[in-house]
Every structure is written in structure tokens, then in C-alpha cells.
Image: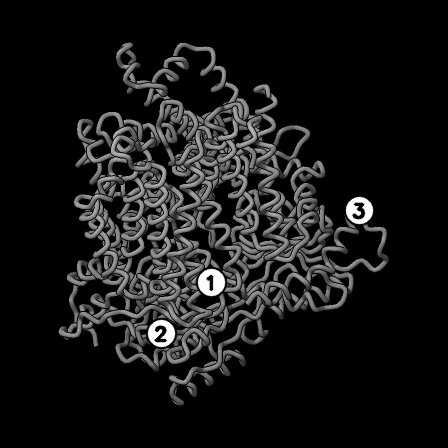
Amino acid sequence: MNATLERIAVPTLALLASAVLFGLLLAFYAHVDPLEAFALMYQGAFGTWFSWQNTLTRAAPLILTALCTALPARLGLVIIGNEGALVVGGVAAAAAGIAVSGAPPLVVQTAMAIAAMVMGGLWIAFAGALRQFRGVNETISSLLLTYIAIALMNHFVEGPLRDPSSLNKPSTWPIGDANMIGTIPGMDVHWGLVFGILACLLCYLFQRFTTWGFAMEVIGGNPKTARMMGLDVSRYVLLACAAGGAAAGLAGMVEVAAIHGRANASLAVGYGYSGILVSFLARHHPAAIVPVSILLGGIGASGGLLQRRLDLPDAAVVVLQGIIFVAILASETLYGRLLKPKAAT
Amino acid sequence: MIDKFNIGRRGLLGGAAAGAMTLGLGGTANAQKPLVLGFIYVGPRDDYGYNQAHAEAAAVLKKMAGVKVVEEEKVPETVAVEKSMESMINLDGATLIFPTSFGYFDPHMLKEAAKFPKIEFRHCGGLWAQGKHPMNTGSYFGYIDEAQYLSGIVAGSVSKSGKLGFIAAKPIPQVLRNINAFTLGAQSVNPKITTQVIFTGDWSLPVKEAEATNSMIAQGVDVVTCHVDSPKVVVETAERAGIFTCGYHCNQAKLAPKGYLTGAEWNWERVYVDMVESMKAGKAPGNFVRGGLKEGYVRTSAYGPAVPAAAKEKADAAKTAILNGSLAIYKGALKDNKGNTVIPAGTSYVITEPKLEGMNYLVEGVVGSTS
Amino acid sequence: MASDLGLWSVPLAMIAGAIRVSTPFIFVSVGECLTERSGRINLGLEGTMVMGAMSGYGAALISGSPWLGVLVAALVGLMFGALHAVICQLPKVNDVATGIGLMLFGTGLAFFLGKPLIQPKAPNLGAIDLGWWSSIPQVRQALQVNYLFVIGIVLAFGMAWALKNTRWGLIVRLAGESVDAALAIGASVARTRLIATSIGGAFAGVGGAFLSLYYPGSWSEGLSSGQGLMAVALVIFARWDPIRCLWASLLFGAAGAISPALQSVGVTQGYYLFSAAPYVLTLALMIATCSPERSLKGAPGELGAVK
């Protein structure tokens, strides 16, 4: 079997297997007709133009937060602090937006984006620096930093930055309607989607065609060889962490500038954690992040319909996501063995 | 156990078929189109608390003729709720939407209201204002602090240590009103009483809520109540430690047969049935709907076995006074717990006073801070 | 009724908090410690723990016996651990990613199957009253100790001893340090890891049962706010030593009690920042105690995520 065909066949098999497993659960535990459920899911995720837009809107933040895990992963780091970078980025964006709110919208928006990316970048680069210079494991430090980021956000949003008129939903002052970035012309999807796709494209080109990208691959393959070659590993680690954090920070800025118009606790709704999943499923490959995010967004978009039409709990969709993830990850073992009968499952 | 799940599902199966038909045939099949209502909850529908109070009322609506209810739970206060509303409108044909969490109001519901001017949106807890917000939106809420005041009277009468406890999520006006009303109620029977407040920081953190309850018990608090999404943990922890509790959102007497005194409960059924009736009559539901004990939007749980007759008498008397308008909960001179006068002497606020919806202080006798 | 201990009640509350809150951390981290020592990482214990909480609660409800609930939780945890081990044994499968996938699957499945368990009330595990000698109610309350807490401590020491002194412990460590060395003495790496990962899962299941059957003591979807994930992270903090896992868990539990304890004695400003205390403290301790040279001391050589 040739490689391209395999690359399509293996995930398809995994998806089919997940569908069967999930269908069994629906049929025998929830007593719901699985075919009806799948038809509804298709309807809710991709069945109409509205559904597509719903899916893409949900995919947008995941594309950006996934990069936060994916970029450092090329160097062999496991960063799971995506949520924290998004949160600090969002708060920084709101603070910057409020600070310069009198300026022309484009200036305000640029300031917000820069503030968010710098803050998010520093946040993850801190985890990278701790690893390089203090030997602190980056997985745990980035997770701890997430909890700290959320606490800081709550403190600022309900304390120093609070708009007193945001009564029962404590929030910062608004950045102003004129400074919102709005939606992509012709669709009801915000600009975060474009930012995400562009960022993935940039990362892909960078990794593929630049010396730095090549150097990172060498480090990821074998740090000792890289050091012997004279590569400054720490510099690349910091760079990758900063870039990943900046992407997640930008996701926070988009939440503020395209959706909420202010920073509040709704920044921390789990996009960062979903981003980790996306990155691992995409095997940390920037080009694969986009379709995986869309798949995940689609499942999210269809979840509502399952609840409303079949009275399934929200958790049904989480179960499906879990099954799909495990199946796709497990199916990686099939690569190169699909034709051998013993591998057939 | 599994039965509950099945009944719910069967109840909707018919609805699902009808929905699929509407979808396929563009709604032409049925001359008598049912009124489709969309309910959106921020947490699980069966949380023994805030969301359950709404879901119980929605379950009542399901039994009304010509009404179909679609529900979505655990929808975060982000673009997800916008998409849920759109999906209910586009795919289910919902014409009246109830987003029940406070954070859904601005900007999410307002955005959707502008997008769908023919759909009615009624939000729980928001502050709708004529001229400021579109006419196809509105808000409803209950003055549950009236019920909290009555809980406070009972708690104040029962407490031996003179220390009450209040576990709260965040220092927002709706929460502060409840803490203050509870305290003022208690002080009306025992002026020296204090209420200890612990903020957990979020609406659903069971371990922290249990910890907060325990640290209060360690400080000698002997009656606790709370304002979190699900009071279950607080009530059960208190019962286990042998102290008393006042419930919130729903009736939690079952969880604490010995120590449950009374509680402040929502009665959303009253609000929703009215709104649905006016929709069926071809009128838009009210835009600014508020009510307390008198309107039946809120109520108190039946007294538990530990409540002495004298306490019942005092609480019942206060209830009568609230119902006939002779008792104002918030009246001057009222000081906050930093010593500032927040309501001058001689001023008395009726419960509908808009200033109360922006409350940002804790009254004297409350141990705690709003930031 | 209560004695006025003033600010002394804060450290007392922290000890009490450590005793009450740390048990799930102890079980999950000691279990994960064993798994990681065998050269396998299981990030999905959060999901296993939540499944344990749900199934334990359900079993206790149906049978009326909370201890049967604990047993069922352990079995469910065992199955989840075994599932993880079996999937990860397939060639080319990444164990970190699979763990994250199983975390999602476990939590989702627990919420899905646990819907009918939210309303009913299951019997709780009792506590041992170790504070009978004291007349101070705060002390008596702090010393309400659950059996699982004691079992957790015993397990941590037992695990440390077994890893060091038994043949089986040696095989586990060999499988984690060097596959070649393990093969050389004729041990099956796959079987060792399967057993170690399954036992780790069973521990996590029991940790979950503690949450639903003792403290806070009921089943709900918000029951775990990331305790399982944090406990896995604590293993790295504790440098793969079961006894240090125990200390780390106790420290983490104690730090979590700071915020409510301070508020209850009237220190009420900035409670969000106090709530972050456990995380800040852990991070600060790591920064202080790690150094580039000895950061990997104790790390199993075959562990992929920490190369």
C-alpha cells in the first residue's frame, strides 16, 4: 500500500472504529438510534452553511492554542500551559486596548495583538527558560503557570482592572465597539480563523525552508548531536516557546477583540486544553493542526444538536472525542503494516 | 436509576421526530406549529442548584400543549452560546430563547438579538433597560434576597455561637445582596450576630466548598448557607459535622434531614408559564420582569425539624410584613463593614430599587471583603 | 463552643486541610510513580480518577457498602490502566498523547454514565476520631482521619520499600531504566509495564473514590478540578520517589487550605492570590531545588517525556 493512501486509510479506519464504539454505547446504554445520532452530528457540524460557520468559529481558537504545544514539541518539549498563555494574552490585550483606546482602531488592534503575543510569549518562554537554565520540568511548570495565570486574571478582573458597571459578570473596561476586529467578510466567522491558518502556514514554511527550522529539527531529533554541532539549544528552546506562547496569547486577544470586547473569566473555558489535544493528534505538524481543529470544532458544534434532539447529556460528545483521540493515536501503529494480515483488527 | 434517563429521552423522542420533519420539509408539514423554546444552561441540568431550578421549570413547560422545549447544558459564556442560540433558531425553529446564565447577556445575547430581530430573547438576571437594549430582548429575575432575609431570621434564632457562615463564589451584586439580606435577617433577631464569608472564586469547586465549610466550622460557625451553583457539598458537609444549614436555589432538605433549617428557592415556573402564555396569545413577553415572595418567583423551603416554634413565628411574621409591604430589608441608617454609611438614616429602599442591583458592599457584621 | 485560637488556627487549618484534601493526590501520585518507574507515563489518571469516583459512588449506592465502592473503583481504575498499557504497547504509539486521550475519554464516560448518580445519596466512608484526647474543637476536627488516608501513607512507604528491596521492584526499575538490561535478566518489559500501569490506574481509581465517598463526599461533574492532572505533575516534582510523593501531596493539600483558612480568620483581601498558593509554592520549590545538573536525577531512563 503506498504511503499517501495509507495516510488516508489509517485515520479513516480509526474514525470508523470510533463510530462503531460510540454507536454501541448509544444503542445499548442510551437507547438511541446511532444512525440518527450520526446523521444529526453531520447536520450540526457540516450539514448546512450555518453549521460550517459554527464549526469554523469553534475551530479558530484551537488552531492558535495548538501551536503553543506544537512548536516546542519539535524540540522535544511537552508544554501544556496553553490555557495560561491564552489567559494572560487576553488580559494583556484588554489592558493595552483600554490604555490606547483613543487611538485609531488599527493602532489599538495592533497594540492589543502585540501586547497579547508578548505576554503569552514571555509566559511560555519562562517555562522554557526554567527548563534550560534551572532544569525545571517544563510540563509541570507550564501547568502550574496556567493555574497561576487564571488566579491572576481573576484578581485583576475583579480588582484593579474591574469596570464597576460590569455588575454580575466582573470584567475589565470594554475596549470599545470601534476597536472590535469583527468577522471575515461574507461569513459569520471571526478573524481568528484567518490568524490561525496564517500562523500555521508561517510555522510550516519556517520549519520546512529555513536554517533555523532545520536546526530545530536536529535538536528535536537528538539534543546531544545538536550541541556537538555547536547549536545553541537554549536559544532555540526559548524561541520555540516564545513563538508558541505568542500564538496562544493571540488567541486570547482574538477572544477579547472579536467576541467579548473585554477580558473576563470567560477567557478560561478550556480552549488551551483542547489545543493540547489538537497538537498531539496532529503530531505537532502545523499543517495538520488546521484539519484536526476543524474536526474537533465540528464535534463541538454538533454536540448541541445531540443534546436537543436526542436528550443526550453534554458528556456524550466528550466521550466521542475521547474515543476518536484514542483510536487515532492507537491507529498509528498500523502505519506500514496495513497489508499484513496479523495487524488487521 | 436508568429509568430517569429513559423517561427524559422518550419525552423528547416525539419532539425529535417533529424537529427532523421541520428541518426536512421547511416547516410546511404541520399547520399547527408548536411554540419552540430554547433553554441554555451554563452547568449540568441536574446540579442540585441553579441550573436544576431552571431545568425543573422547563420540565413543567414541556407538559404544556403546543409547546416544545429544546435544552442545552454546560454551554460556556463565550461564542459557544451565540452559536447555540443560532443553532436553536436555525435548526430547531426556536422563537423564544432563555439563556439562563448571567454572562450570556452582554455581548452574546444582545448580538444575537440584533441578528434575529423576530426572535424573542429573555435572559435570567440581566438588567434590561428601555432604549438601551433591543425590544426583542428582556430580563427576568427574582428578589431572592427576600427569602434569604427569612433564612437569616431562622439562622439567627437557631445559632448558639452567634456566628453564621456564608460560602460564596464571587463578590458580585447578586451574591452580596444575598449575604447582606441573610445577615440583616439574622441581626433582626440578634443584633450582635456576625456572618463569616468565604469566597471560593468560582461557581463550582466542590473540594474548596467543603474546605470552606470546614474552616468555618473550626471557627465556631454553627449555621451555614451558600451561594454557589450547587449547594449540595456545603449542605452535606455541614450535616456531617452536625451543624445547621439553610439551602439555596432548590430544596436540599433531603440532603440534611437533621440540620436543614429552611432555604431560599427559585420558582421559575411562575415566570416561564406567564411568558409562554403571552407568546401563545401572540404577544411579546415582558421586557423587565422582576418579582419576589409576593409574585411567587421565590419561596422558602418548609422548616426543618430543628427550627423552634419561636423562630418560625418570627420568620412568618417577617414574611407577612414583606408580603404586605410594611417591611423593608434595606433601610437606613445602614453601615458597611468598613464603617461607611451606605444607606443614610431615614432612607428606605423598596426591594425593586435599581441601586440595589449594583450593590458592592458587605454590611456591618459581615466578616469578609469584596475584593 | 469554639476556642479562640486567633491566627494559630491558620496552621492548624493547614494541617487539617492536608489530612482532608491530600488523599487523592497521594493515591494518584504514588500510583503514577510506580507507572513511571516502569518506564511508562500515564497522563490520563485524571480521567481514571473521575471514573473511579463515579463507579465507586454508584457501587456504594447500589450495594450500600462504601468499601465495596472503593473496591469497584479500584477495579475500574485497573481496567483503565490496563487499557492504557495495552494501547501504548503497540509500536509507534505515543504514551503521553494516549494518556491525554484517555483522560478525555474517562471524564466524558464518567459524566455520561454518572448522570443518574447525581441526585441519590450514597453511604459515606467513615472517619477515625484521633482527636478524642483534645478539648479544642479545631484540633478534634482536624484529626478526623479517614482510613484511606492511612492506607495511602502505608502504601507510599510500602511502595518505596518494595521498589528498593524486592525482586519485583528491581524488575520494575530495570524496565524503566533500560529495556536492554531488563531483557538481559529475562524479564518481560511489556508485562512489567502492563502490571505497573494497571496498578497505577487502580490507585487513581481509589483516589477518585475518596473524592466521591468521603471528601467532599458526593458525585457531581465538578468533583475534580484537575486534582488528577496535578497529582501526575507532582510525581515529577517528587522526582519519582513514592515517599516524596507523599510529602508533596501533603504540602499541596496544606497549601490549598490557606485561602479558606485566612478568610475564616478575617484576612480577606486578595483571596484569588491566596488560592494560587499551592501552585506558586510548588513552582517556587521546584525553581529553588532544581539545577540543570541534577534535574534528571531519579528520572527513569526510558521515560519518553522527560528526555
- Check if mark 1's residue and mark 3's residue have beta carbons within 8 Å: no
Mark 2 crowd level (few <14, some 14–19, many ≥20, 10 Å Cα)? some
Please indicate whether residue A170 sits to the left or right of residue B74 in the image. left
Please indicate whether residue C250 sits to the left or right of residue B248 in the image. left
Say above or below: B305 vs A96.
below
Query: SS at mark 3?
Result: helix
Instruction: Mark 3 or mark 2: name the one nearer the start of the chain.
Output: 3
The answer to whether any part of residue B349 appears in the image is no
Residue assigned mark 1: B356
Same chain for mark 1 and mark 2? The answer is yes
Residue assigned mark 2: B239
Kind of residue at badge 1: Leu
Question: Residue visible at 41% across and 85% down?
Answer: B305
Write down the quadrant of residue B225 in the picture: bottom left
Kind of residue at badge 2: Glu
- Tell me the mark number nearer the camera, choosing from 1 and 2: 2
Residue assigned mark 3: B24
Same chain for mark 1 and mark 3? The answer is yes
